[in-house]
Image (cartoon, rainbow, N blue to C red):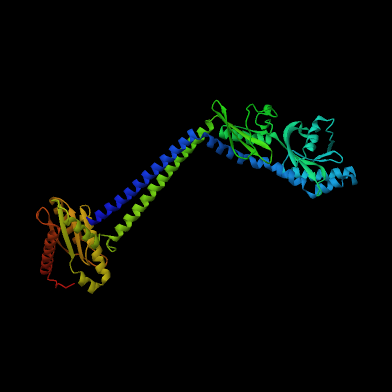
Amino acid sequence: MLQHHFTFTKNTVTRLTFAIVLVSFLLSTFVSLWSLSVMSRRNTRELSRMMAARIYDSISSELNEPVTLGLAMARDSFLIKALQNEKNVPEAESTAAFQEYLSGIRDGFRYESVYVISDATRRYYNFDGLSKIVDPEHDEHDYWYGQFLNKHTDYDLDVGFDEQSQDTWAVFVDTAIRDRAGTFLGVCGVGMHMHQSHDLFLSLEKEHQVKIMLLDTAGQIQVDTEEGRLLTRYENDLKLSPSGDYVYHDLGGGKIAVSKYLEKLDWYLVVESDGSGIQEETFNMILLNIALFVFIMIILILTLRIISMRTAALTNASLRDQDTQLFNRRAFEEEKARLMANALDENFVYAIMDINGLKTTNDTLGHAAGDELIRGTADCLRKCFGRYGKIYRIGGDEFAAMLHISESQLDQAREELNKAVAEWKGELVDKLSISCGYASAREFPSENVADLSRISDERMYAEKTEYYRRTGIKRRKT
């Protein structure tokens, strides 16, 4: 049947499209996973650099923030003027001004240690007021101040104990304060306690299964999750490069390390790995690819299903009669054309039906009554013949059916149709009468569908003539 052939073609195209997309996606996924696996085995160096980059991005903002804050404090006009006028105001008034200023910094940025040291008076101010007088020559806790002066740098990072917090390990960002002429006025800065970076480093180490530390240019460990390793020399002799690139180091025994110079801190980020973290990450990426593949395939199947159903619905609508929902003339002609190209099986039956007196009903009772006769005929035909084949409305009052039905089933269906027609009663019309003609391949085995159509049409008109003769109703030309 052309309609069936059309549907078959649509289904074939849909299946072929799905197969092509599926194979293409499988191939691309396979290639991706294979490439990922090869990259994992052969390019561990690049994967390590990628992982170090992710870690660098995670910690750079937290580690750079205190440097940025220290530089901002050193350029604060209030702080510069306060140090320039320090000797001209009473000590209590100067202390109160510095205390208020540093308390604001501490409350706003949540640092445990915020301080200013006047080079003129060597007073050490913090958010509690005047803490002490710095004496780098005699007090070992102040030795750092003398070292900072000798470096002649804008800022420096120093790891040590915070006396104000019960000798807690901290990273201090010491920043030089100078006036517009470049005269050195003192030092300001913040202290970031190790526990602040410890939690971040620990979470990153757990997530990536690596060891993270920060080394100074001499190879000493400045930040580490193991407090006992602080200020000790790193056990591996790395060729650290200040280029800013990620540098790969083979530590032997399957261990690797990636280092990167942190310019603002003048330290090096070092990430150690034994490869297991990379393997797990690769495995997770493979699982992600598989999950993505499954998700896309589900979406693809659902999309193709919806498109197929929508196409079928549109196709079906174009082949249906809108008034009766039976197949229309187009579907009828396509079916006949298909059957003309194929041999008929012996159970094939061609039937044609015509409503008696439809024009008279239209003329006397109106077209609404005529439409009621048409729908009533469709309902009777659908009820009696629908399970055996397809029923068509091929004209105003003309219907056809192409059935695959045995002889005994046909006899029974015809009786059911006669009974259904006799019992039918509408709201506008009291009764229904139709004339039918049947021709089967069993009865005419050598005839094709066109011949059966002609024979059944002749039989239908013979029955219609007999109907008008029997009832005495004058036949109207339609």
| Number of numbered tags placed on the structure image | 0
> Is residue 178 or residue 281 the one in the foreground?
178
Where does the image place residue 189, in percent across and percent down from the top left? 76, 41
> Is residue 119 or residue 18 the one in the foreground?
119
- The image shows residue 340 at horizontal and vertical percentages of 16, 57
Residue 453 is situated, as x and y percent measured from the top left of the image, at 14, 60
Residue at the limit of the structure toward the bottom, as seen here: 363
The N terminus lies in quadrant: bottom left
Observer able to see residue 89? no
Residue at position x 23%, y 61% in the image:
378
Of 294 and 65, the residue lying toward us: 65
For image coordinates 17% across by 61% down, the residue present is: 352
**Displayed quadrant of residue 364:** bottom left
Is residue 473 depicted above or below 407 in this figure? Answer: below
**Can you see residue 139?**
yes
Q: Is residue 141 left or right of residue 171?
A: right
Q: Is 15 placed left or right of 410 in the picture?
A: right
Q: Is residue 95 above or below residue 432?
A: above
In the rendered structure, the answer to whether residue 253 lies left or right of residue 132 reads left
Q: Which quadrant of the structure image shows residue 338? A: bottom left
Image quadrant where residue 458 sits: bottom left
The residue sitting at the top extreme is 253
Q: Which residue is drawn at the image coordinates 74% and 41% (left, top)?
A: 155
Quarter occupied by the C terminus: bottom left
Tell me where residue 17 appears, x and y as whole percent.
Answer: 34, 49
